[in-house]
Amino acid sequence: MGKSYLGEFEEMVLLTVAHLQSDAYGAAIMEDIQQRTGRMVILSAVHVVLYRLEEKGLVTSTVGGATAERGGRRKRIFTITAYGIHTLAQIRQQREELWQLIPKSIRPSTL
Amino acid sequence: MNNKLQPPSWIDTFLQMRLPQEQFEEVQGDMHELYVQWVSKMSKSKANRMYLLNALTFLRPLPRRNKHHYSTLRPYLQANFFDMLFNYLIIALRNLIRQKAFSLINIFGLAISMSVGLLIITMISDTFSLDNFHQKKDRIYGVITTDQVRGQPAMHLASSSVRAGKQIGATVPGVESVTLLRRGFGGDATIKDTKISLSGLWASESFFQVFTFPLLQGDPATALIEPYSLVLTEKTAKKLFGQVDVLGQQIKFDTLTYIVTGVMKDVPKLSHIQFEALVSFATVELQKPDTGDGDFFAWENIYMNYAYLLLSQNANPQTVQVNLDQLSAAQNASFTNRKITLSLLPIANISTGERLVNPIGPTFFNNAARWVLAGLALIVILSACFNYTNLSIARALRRSKEVGIRKMIGAAKSQVLVQFIMEAIVISLFSLIFSFLLFLLLRTQFLSLASQAADLFRLELSAGLVVYFVIFAILVGITAGILPALFFSRINAIQVLKNASLKLFYHIALRKILIVIQYTFSLIFITTTIIGFNQYKSFLTYDLGFSTENILNIPLQGNSGKLLKNELTQLPAVQGISTSMMVSSLGSLYGGSMKYKDPVDSANVWMNHVDEYYLPLHEYTFLAGKNFNAKANAVSESEIIVNEQVLNRFDIGKREPEKALGEVLTVQGKKLTIIGVVKDFHYGTLDKNIEPTILRYSNEPGGYLNVKIRSTDLPATLANIKAAWKKIDRVHPLEASFYDDQIEQAYNQYSVMIKIIGFLSFLAISIASVGLFGMIVYSTETRLKEISIRKVLGASESSLIYQLSKGFLALLLIAAFIALPVTYLFFNFVVLREFVYHQPIGISELLLGVGVVMLLAIIMIGSQTLKAARNNPVNVLRNE
């Protein structure tokens, strides 16, 4: 089983990195999560999580892509690793199994 | 770029300081990008707030992206920092051990000076914890009285009138309760057949409501209501009955019987009110004493009673004060030339603040004395710190290589600074251990120095104090270490490592200044001690205008003077006996008003009641007239002897003594004829002017027997007197003391002060000497080669000694030239101004101290330089 446990926010960030693809950098991830969940996200929290994910080997990063609105500063683009995808899949599978165990009578039909 | 889209730049600066370089770029990029969005969505100020909020959250610990980042805050946040501290500690200890002489000098100096500091910290902590045990101490106020008679300076009294206390309780809002106290209860407590003398206070029933004195027995609410109720302290109860279970017991004083209604825990030492027993105030209200000062309940009867207030929870002292002012104004309406006003004084300030007349208990050092003492101790401590500074900088050559290498390896300036300050702190903490032992010694010495000290101070240790001690030691360490640390942190590594002969004497000016300061203070201290001691001695031998030699004063303690006199005249050693109401020239005064011909011109005069033997026995000088005639009891008083000032004050007989004889004075309503004029004599102490003073006749004044003794075997004579006393009074022990000793006692406070300053000057001189010694050892050591070369080239020993010592001697001379005028001016214009009668300051007194200090320094310099000069040049020069 996965040796790395992922927190809820970490999982959210990792999923966002996965779907944003080449656009996954701090500010964009923060915006995306804010829009989807409607909750207030703090930039440093996103950065801390990204560094930690990188430490665990779930994402890698490259530096590049300066734009005018950033005042010419480069951004760090994060990409999910195969191990990252695998971990997400594992988590999803565990959840799926648990969902299956819930009796049909109370399980929402949309899922 | 559009300025509107720029976030506040100081926040960016903050981010830059906080974050490692490569993280900073991406974070700032993200932040700016977000800022642009925020500005488009909300107001600029709100966007700025968001920006700041997000920036601040980067203060949280960040995971490290890689190992090579750097920020200004970093070195102190790394785990490595503690390893470095440990390393500094080891280096400090190694240096301590390697350079024993320097460590010893430093630890010695710091330890003795810090012990004084510890004593002062304990003392100050004691004064701050005075009366702290009262639970409602923030709300307890004493009522103090200002008595202003027109044409005389205002007098501030700790006491107030019974009327004031009652009126406040009845009319002033915001006062929860008032308790009245009265001093002077005392006498022989008689229980069955035993008599034990007991003293205490009268206190009204709300005493236990205002103050926190827990009762072991009895009810605090009712214990002091009934007349003739008595509350004993635990100790007193044990003394009287041998137990504390004594409720309802009877105690007789003279003919009156009191009933014990309570036993309370002993009064804590740090209480400004001290007593053995409390008697209900109702008792004294029944007795109504004080007829001499007017009615017991009179507004102007302000000398014996005390009022303490407990303000309500939310009362404002200022509002209460306004009410007191109104109360005083209403009561003063009936006076024409006198004003008595009341004011509030928080209980914390009663015995540590301004000095008041008639204090209820012992008064603490007032604030000024406390700070002066602390200031003197600070000077001594600073002197020891200077030693450390000087010696450390002098040793720079040795340590500078170490610092150079540290810097090469990558030590930051701040790290070197921390290292050297830590070394100083290590030394001062070592010193703390020794100074603590010294402090324990010093404490017993201090408490036995003056009888008052033991009453005033507890000087007990507590955990809190130990914390203060450690903080104090660390502060001392920082003070001592800051200059050398700054010096070392600024060392240029390349210069030091390339060229060993660093500008060693670069800081020579600083060192010279420090030595001069040290010696200036040492000299000021020692001259102050010498001058003070001489002045003090001169007080003791000052010509008071009468003789005090071999006169033994015996307080009669209520016994008959006649009976004792009969016993004593039989002793062969007794040459003469007189009786007086009081002993003059010791500081206690007794006065009354006097008039001459003009019925409205009255003046206060000091007086003493004496018998016909008093004046000859004390060898008073008569300018005119004669001594009192012996009279039988029945004849009423008619004669008076005055001093010259009385003639001056009332312009009697054109101020000529002969012409004043026969004139009639009215003293306290009695008409008395002048039969003699004596030369002015010192009725008060020497810090007071001689004022109009009169001597009145009484064939049995009570008070004191003055016994003139001539004896070759004093102990035997005293034993005989004691035996005679025993026959008269079996309860009280004899309290005889020689007049000269009593005078010494009267000036005791100065003796205590001189002892303290003398002790401090001893410390200051030892510290300065040790420091100087260290400097001499060091400088002769470094100049050993120079000396040898000079010697080889033909210099004589004496010229070498001159060469080596002239620098130091010059410094000492500069110190002397600063110290002497300062001390002289200080004494002449500040201290001795306080004393009306004093000796002038002699040149010899000024020079004596300088001589002693110089001699010490010369011996040190001489011995060391001689040692260096005597060195065989071959031994020094051959290993080059």
Image (tube, grey):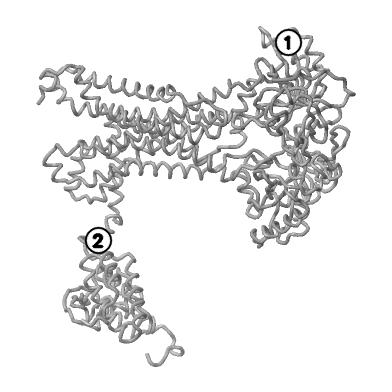
Please provide percent x and percent y for residue B381: 40, 37
Please give the label number shown on residue B575: 1
Please give the label number shown on residue B837: none
Instruction: Quadrant for the N terminus of chain B, please.
Output: bottom left
* Rendered residue at 66%/15% (across/down): B550
The Cα atoms of the two marked residues, 2 and 1, are separated by 93 Å
Specify which label sits upstream in the sequence, 2 or 1.
2
Amino acid of disc 1? Gln
Query: What residue occupies the far bottom of the structure in this picture?
Result: A109
In the rendered view, does B634 fall on the left or right side of B333? Answer: right
The reply to whether residue A15 is in sight is no
Callout 2 crowding tier (Cα within 10 Å): few <14, some 14–19, many ≥20? few
In the rendered view, does A58 fall on the left or right side of B304? Answer: left
Instruction: Quadrant for the C terminus of chain B, please.
Output: top left
* Foreground disc of the pair 2, 1: 1
Please provide percent x and percent y for residue B47: 34, 80
Callout 1 secondary element: strand
Say if labels 2 and 1 share a chain.
yes
In the rendered view, does B800 fall on the left or right side of B651? Answer: left
Dot 2 and dot 1 residues touching (CB under 8 Å): no
* Rendered residue at 65%/26% (across/down): B682
Above or below residue A95? Residue B665 is above
Please provide percent x and percent y for residue B116: 46, 35
Quarter where residue B771 is shown = top left
Callout 1 crowding tier (Cα within 10 Å): few <14, some 14–19, many ≥20? some
Amino acid of disc 2? Ser
Q: Which residue is mark 2?
A: B71
Labels in figure, total: 2
Above or below residue B684? Residue B562 is above
